[in-house]
């Protein structure tokens, strides 16, 4: 038995995997891929686990399934945890339903059944980041990815929904033949081309030009980014043409005079930032050091003689030894509290910024009903647009500041400044008072 | 700041594997390995030499071997220069210890990952630095108050096998 | 060849230092110590060098010596570089003269001849951190360090000045017999005892209880700290009893109803923060990782057969290969720009905070002359005290945020919030307006 055990280990080292089935560009079902790569598949399926960390993870909240929403478990509601969010988003679907995000296994259901779907008619575009859509895009475009993308964007959500079956799957990140990473998302392909063009690099093709280490982040950047729907054809666009920093993205929206909605209490043309993990990570020391999303969220783990990437994508704080200790020789408890100290500072500052914004919205509301001069209101509304986007850029980012600790505090500090200056814009000059 | 065992999460082995493991571990590890078949098979003999490759009989040591080859020391120091104390007896005692525990851990697949240096080995290694560099560090060392020794690897962790 | 080279080095190394002279607790003159330790002495003397970095170092500014001030070279004036500082410090000596700090060699002259000396009568206490005073203290106290300290604190500066000769010297950091590090500064000894007592550690004695690694920072903490003069006996006190964080220090000042001066334009009882390097460093990731001041500011250098600590104490950015690269395997240029990116973020936020404070001070001034209600003024004045101390805590800290990047931005963000809330406190409630 023992001889075998040693023998096995030596074997493993030589023989990585057996190809049981043939995988093609049409193989959508991860279970089929799983026949060749059982270890990755097993971990992949574990994204159904729900476990909370101090600031992340997610909590399994039981609910009674209904006809409209058959889910028996959801993640905790963020707007109930912090009602100030309802004020920030007044008049927008997010004020109706916004929950903590959870594992990949839930992405399709959570999108399909969120009350935000009732609150507003959504386009097929949504599915770009919530389903295994590489194959459906190709099919719809008769082999042309971009054509299919454009077609699905313009369908109503319910229509497009019928064309997809799985949450993100192997085919969305991998070349079925070489197993190399590949980008399947038009939004990211076009976003990166625009970003590079802005930096003077012509005709950048992510699948041709990216290094392997870059790909270890880019596959995530396909979805974990800020975005908007452009024009009546509802094209999914990543607003990166002038850069990835919050002020550069806002500048682009301002230039395009884009707004997500009109604030119900103040009439301001406001924006909703959404999960800019890729953008904020880019401003941090880890990105600068070449540390990829996958290094922390899909760290290598040993299985026998093999090193495999942990496909149970989750909070690294649930997996500190693999996620952090390869690079940092501190004890798990120490690394955990380092991360939490960084997140705690960001969280406190986020709360100060949130209070400032809510007070400001209150003032602006009274000023409008009190019939303050148009110009004054307009100035204040622009401050609200800024304050809100900056705050949401950190609030919506899911690492609670960890991906770029100093940059996150920079953004929140400026948000506070915008809110307060907005309040002041509504007041008479001092001295003139009384 | 090394991980306390209390914080290590490792899967418990079955009683059988432990017993068997100890058997082979002894064979593998003890310098006096009674030419058992297992011993020969797993290149146990090579484990007695100073050849770094012998450490990498275990794939688990492979990364360190690969890194060592790229290190500033590969021309001047082998694994044992840094991981076993000077002197014949202590040296082979430590090799037996490494051999025993590593074999036990390896064959039962029961150890904390990533592998971390134990307090004892850390001291062995700290002394190894002095073995070769005492002249260079004489001045900074003479300051050492009895209580706390200057740690070389606080700054030079990567000398043997850079990340 | 290697063998030979090692062999040769052994020759050189056989007896690393010849003890030419006997050093005792009375040996004040570094030149004498230099006879035993020529390499350290040579580096020590190089602190006269002046070289500017992006945010630090110092610039040699020629001046025509006068009777009152014989210096022919000074460092650039910070209040001319940024006149907003004059508003922040209106009515305080710092508004008269405040320069970029430079090397240790200048500490005694710069203190003696700063115009701040004319602006206000200073006590002997000042010398605690600007001279080699270990021996003078002992002498004045007939062997008792603390007695001598108390005596000199109460002398006028000019009197006490006569008792000292050198800037910080060997004896201030070293035991003359063992050469081990030792703390010679009463302010630090008592400050640490208070800090530890607050943490529940009774009767902490830094020279008995500190580890060698701690000492590599503590010797610097003797002077690079926030401080105040307590009571009529002008005792030097480090305000650490409730902790080292900015809010903990402010709480202590508030409880003691302590103020540095009354603001000339607003009448607010305000505080001046001063070089809290030790305090801020303590909040940073390097301190948390056990990285000491000396690791970066006095890194080891190879000198002949020996490694020695570089006693040319200076900006690590002038010495990146020794100061950073043993721990960080990045190219020098990369490490430099990492540090400067961190400092740049802090600098921009500092400017936003400075603008906010200056606007606020303007408003408060008008409100007072405009005869606003007492209560309103009092509230605003307290906001000014807070805003100013928080801002100055980062402004006066000399790493431009590097020692604790995220904490520095946290503090500046809160300062902005205080300034803006102060401005709002001076305005009528919105709606009530018009
Ligand atoms: Ca989550
Ligand atoms: Ca300076």
Image: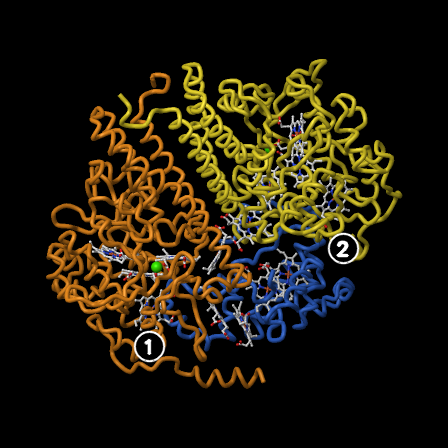
Chain colours: A yellow, B blue, C orange
Q: Nearer the viewer, mark 2 or mark 1?
A: 1
Q: Nearer the viewer, residue A421 or C214?
A: A421
Is C42 above or below relative to A295?
A: below
Question: In the picture, which quadrant includes the C terminus of chain C?
Answer: top left
Chain designation of label 1: C
Q: Which mark is residue A9?
A: 2
Residue A302 placed where, x, y %? 69, 50
Label 1 belongs to which residue?
Answer: C37
Residue at the spot 38% in from the left edge and 58% down from the top edge: C56
Say yes or no: labels 2 and 1 on the same chain: no
Q: In this orientation, which residue lies closer to the viewer: B4 or A411?
A: A411
Name the secondary structure under disc 1. loop
Q: Position of residue A258 (x, y in %)?
A: 60, 30
Q: Where does the image place residue B129, in percent across and percent down from the top left? A: 51, 70
Q: Residue at x 20, y 30 (%)?
A: C369
User: Compared with residue B13, is residue C36 higher up or lower down, i.e. above or below?
Assistant: below
Q: Is residue C353 left or right of residue C323?
A: left
Whether residue A299 is visible: no
Residue A357 image point, x, y percent: 45, 27
Crowding near pointer 2: few (<14 within 10 Å), some, many (20+)?
A: some
């Amino acid at each position: 038995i023992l001889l075998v055990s040693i023998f096995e280990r030596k074997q493993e080292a030589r023989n990585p995997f057996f190809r049981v089935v043939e995988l093609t560009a049409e193989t959508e079902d991860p279970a089929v891929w799983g026949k060749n790569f059982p270890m990755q598949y097993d971990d992949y399926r574990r994204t159904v686990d729900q476990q909370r960390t101090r600031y992340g993870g997610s909590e399994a909240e039981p609910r009674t399934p209904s006809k409209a929403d058959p889910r028996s478990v959801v993640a905790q509601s963020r707007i109930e945890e912090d009602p100030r969010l309802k004020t920030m988003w007044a008049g927008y679907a997010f004020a109706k339903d916004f929950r903590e995000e959870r594992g990949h296994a839930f992405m399709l259901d959570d999108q399909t059944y969120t009350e935000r779907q009732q609150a507003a008619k959504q386009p097929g575009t949504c599915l770009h980041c919530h389903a295994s859509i590489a194959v459906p895009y190709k099919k719809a475009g008769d082999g042309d990815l971009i054509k299919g993308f454009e077609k699905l964007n313009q369908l109503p959500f319910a229509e497009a929904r019928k064309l997809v079956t799985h949450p993100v799957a192997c085919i969305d990140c991998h070349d079925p033949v070489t197993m190399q990473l590949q980008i399947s998302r038009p939004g990211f392909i076009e976003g990166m081309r625009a970003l590079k063009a802005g930096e003077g690099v012509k005709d950048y093709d992510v699948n041709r030009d990216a290094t392997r280490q870059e790909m270890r982040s880019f596959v995530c950047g396909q979805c974990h980014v800020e975005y908007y729907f452009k024009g009546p054809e509802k094209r999914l666009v990543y607003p990166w043409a002038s850069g990835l920093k919050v002020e550069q993205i806002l500048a682009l929206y301002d230039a395009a005079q884009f707004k997500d909605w009109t604030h119900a209490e103040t009439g301001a043309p406001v924006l909703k930032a959404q999960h800019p993990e890729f953008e904020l990570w880019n401003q941090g020391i880890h990105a600068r050091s070449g540390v990829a999303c996958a290094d922390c969220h899909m760290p290598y783990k040993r299985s026998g003689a093999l090193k495999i990437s942990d496909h149970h994508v989750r909070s690294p704080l649930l997996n500190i030894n693999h996620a952090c200790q390869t690079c940092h020789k501190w004890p798990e408890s120490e690394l955990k509290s380092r991360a939490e100290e960084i997140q705690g500072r960001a969280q406190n500052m986020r709360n100060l910024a949130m209070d400032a914004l809510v007070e400001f919205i209150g003032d602006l509301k009274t000023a409008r009903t009190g019939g303050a001069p148009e110009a004054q209101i307009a100035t204040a509304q622009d401050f609200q647009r800024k304050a809100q986007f900056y705050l949401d850029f950190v609030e919506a980012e899911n690492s609670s500041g960890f991906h770029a600790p100093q940059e996150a505090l920079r953004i929140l500090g400026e948000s506070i400044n915008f809110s307060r200056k907005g309040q002041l814009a509504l007041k008479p000059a001092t001295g003139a008072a009384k | 700041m090394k991980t306390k065992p209390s914080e290590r999460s490792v899967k418990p082995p079955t009683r059988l594997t432990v017993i068997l493991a100890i058997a082979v571990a002894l064979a593998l590890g003890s310098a006096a390995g009674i030419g058992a078949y297992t011993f020969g098979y797993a290149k146990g003999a090579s484990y007695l030499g100073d050849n770094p490759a012998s450490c990498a009989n275990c794939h688990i040591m492979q990364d360190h071997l690969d890194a060592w080859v790229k290190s500033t020391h590969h021309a001047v120091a082998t694994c044992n220069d840094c991981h076993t104390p000077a002197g014949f007896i202590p040296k082979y005692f430590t090799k037996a210890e490494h051999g025993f525990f590593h074999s036990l851990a390896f064959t039962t697949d029961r150890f904390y990952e990533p592998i971390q240096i134990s307090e004892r080995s850390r001291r062995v290694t700290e002394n190894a630095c002095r073995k070769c560099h005492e002249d260079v560090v004489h001045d900074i060392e003479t300051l050492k108050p009895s209580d706390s020794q200057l740690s070389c690897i606080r700054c030079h962790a990567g000398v043997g096998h850079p990340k």
